[in-house]
Amino acid sequence: MSKIICKNNIFVLETKNTHYVMGIDEAGYNHHIHWGQKCDVSDYCADNTGDENSNHTRLDEYKQELTPFGQTMYRECDIKAEFEDKCREINLKYDGYKKSDDMLSLVFSDKFYPLEITLNYQIFENSDIIKRWTTIKNTGTGRIDFEKISSAQFSLPSVNAYTFKNTNGAWGGEFIETNNVLEGGYTVFESRKGSSNHNNSPYFIAYQNADEKTGDVYFASLAYSGNFKVSCSRDLYGITRVVMGMNDFDFSHTVNGGEIFDTPPVYCGYVQGFGEMTRQMNRFAVNHILPKQFNDKPLPVLYNSWEATGFDVSVNNQSALAERAAEMGVELFVMDDGWFGQRKNDRAGLGDWYVNNEKFPNGLNELIERVNELGMDFGIWVEPEMVNPDSDLFRKHPDWAYHYPNREACTLRHQLVLNMTRKDVQEYIFNLLDELLSNHNIKYIKWDMNRPFSETGAENLQNPKMYSYLHTMAVYNIVDKLKEKHPEVAIETCASGGGRCDLGALSHYDQAWTSDNTDGIDRMTIQKGYSLLRPAKTMRAWVTDIEGINKPCSLDFRFAVAMQGSLGVGGNLTKYSDSDLEICKKNIALYKQIRDVVQFGDLYRILDIEKDEVLLNQYVTVDKSKGVAFLLANGTRFYKKRIPVCFDGLDENKRYKLTIKNNTYEKSGAYLMNVGIPLHIHGVDYNEIILIEEV
Ligand code: DGJ
């Protein structure tokens, strides 16, 4: 049972398998005491030892939960304020704590200025995940400007160096895993582009001697889609710290008198092995983070028109695609970009969200009705935060895009970013989407965002440097309001592929478009990076006509890759041969059989395509009665590999049945996990989907 123990200014958060401990020392300083395995609670104390000489201060050495800027503390701080009289130093005293069964709040206030800072912790039954966030309260009447406000600080227990796993990506190559040993100085993972973007992930994964199954793994993921910063450091004494939250780059945040500000939350955990990290976070996100309408429902197989018809959508070509999609067993037909305004290419139309009547002379309902008759739901693409200068909207409201009056605006993809911090822009966007959903039988929205910010002037704001935070909150609010009014509509986050797939976005959107790169081979790597700390169910994966840019792979192979998330199809189906159609039908039927296991099960990464030349990913239901394994290889070398394929995550004592290449096996879980089934994995295009069922 999870519980919170508070005694003599020592606070213990007891989760399923871990202790997270902090305390307040006699001088009133907060200390981080322990994060890891459980110890005897009565042994914990706030030890305030530290060196003190004219160059190295105790305060600089302490492991802390909260380190504001000021006094003799010179390392990365969590919070830096400027008060009205220009004093830039915070000096806190501890005021006490509040506690309930699952929540702990430690309250501090400035010794002179009207500032209260509260550290919040929430624990969850049957989980090692802890939610953390910080609350800032201006208890006075004037304004306080913050140069930095982080969500949380972490200190890691070992004095040996940790390696930090993150992702280093780009458009078309999102979530590529990196591992940096941090011996000294700083390692930073961040976004400066206005939203969380393709480059790094807003989390840290710190480990020592860890692999999928063993080794200490500490992780924390920030739920925020604006500019973020995860700043990891190691000092001379070997203390590794992480400060994470909103990026202080081009940032400032004003909290006026009487206002309260809650930072975006962070979800953290300590486990053994990367596999357990993924499984804990996956379960937690499905149960506690994803929006409630669809979190426990299997997502439908969708078709998306983008790769088939690009901007050239029409009632006729979409109907033809829809017929083919329905034949294959698709459940949701999504029309992508091109249906509105004067949208013939990416140069015009964004902002004009009325139906293009050359392409749809009788409105959208003609197509929607056709799709519904075919037995599918209808979904549609929008990019609400953007505007093309060549649009009626921009001609009418040129001041609605972020801009500086005396600077030329940089367009990217011929578009500008709308200033979503303005109330009128927010209303315009909500109303247009609300109207679209009210007048049409639409069950899904793909919400795209295809460029980073620039010229982020926002004359409407008291403090324009709050744009990234306020823009992000405006997007979340509109999504929430739409969902409240149209609870049957699922919404997908997309930003030129996987440019906004963080846990913040996934607290509001139901799923994510993972990457515009739909190459089956590249996808294996992209999907691994995605699913490290993001739920597999949210990972939209389409099978398209890209048969492998550098290495060819078959339609079956591409299905076996895409079925490891929420399956979609995105090829030009009107060109498919009868045998292609049969392959699609067969795989979609199979996916419907296994999707519960994939979308709600536990993922075991057994063989890694980068390290082992073979990919073996297995999903298992929580009760271990059913599993599905995806075994893939694209061109093995040296006549390899004749190997015993061992499975994972099964119950040793249960007996399971599985069929591989027409051979049926019935074995115990112990046998399947420890002895395995010998297989000859070879050829340019090896793919197997193995169903494992309890007998
Ligand atoms: C970028 C997305 O990632 C694509 O899937 C597609 O929706 C295009 N935008 C449309 O412009």
Image (tube, helix red, strand yellow):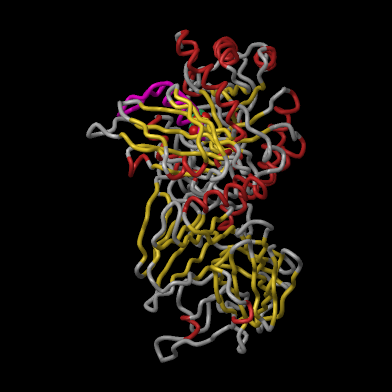
State the image coordinates of residue 408 (x, y, percent, origin top left).
45, 44
In which quadrant of the rendered view does residue 342 lie?
A: top right
Instruction: Check the image and report above or below for 262 versus 672.
Output: below
Instruction: Check the image and report above or below for 538 versus 86.
Output: above
Residue shown at 68%/39% (left/top)? Answer: 296
Residue 403 part of the magenta segment: no
Residue 547 part of the magenta segment: yes
Instruction: Check the image and report above or below for 21 versus 593.
Output: below
Which quadrant of the rendered structure holds the N terminus? bottom right
State the image coordinates of residue 634 (x, y, percent, origin top left).
33, 30
Residue shown at 38%/71% (left/top)? Answer: 160
State the image coordinates of residue 394 (x, y, percent, origin top left).
58, 34
Q: Is residue 137 visible from the viewing direction of this image?
A: yes
State the image coordinates of residue 464 (x, y, percent, origin top left).
58, 56
| Residue 272 or residue 467, whichever sits in front | 272
Which quadrant of the rendered structure holds the C terminus? top right
Q: Which residues are magenta?
A: 542-564
> Which residue in the rendered view is the most extreme toward the top?
578
Residue shown at 41%/91% (left/top)? Answer: 54
Left or right, 170 with respect to 466, comes to left
Q: Is residue 398 visible from the viewing direction of this image?
A: no
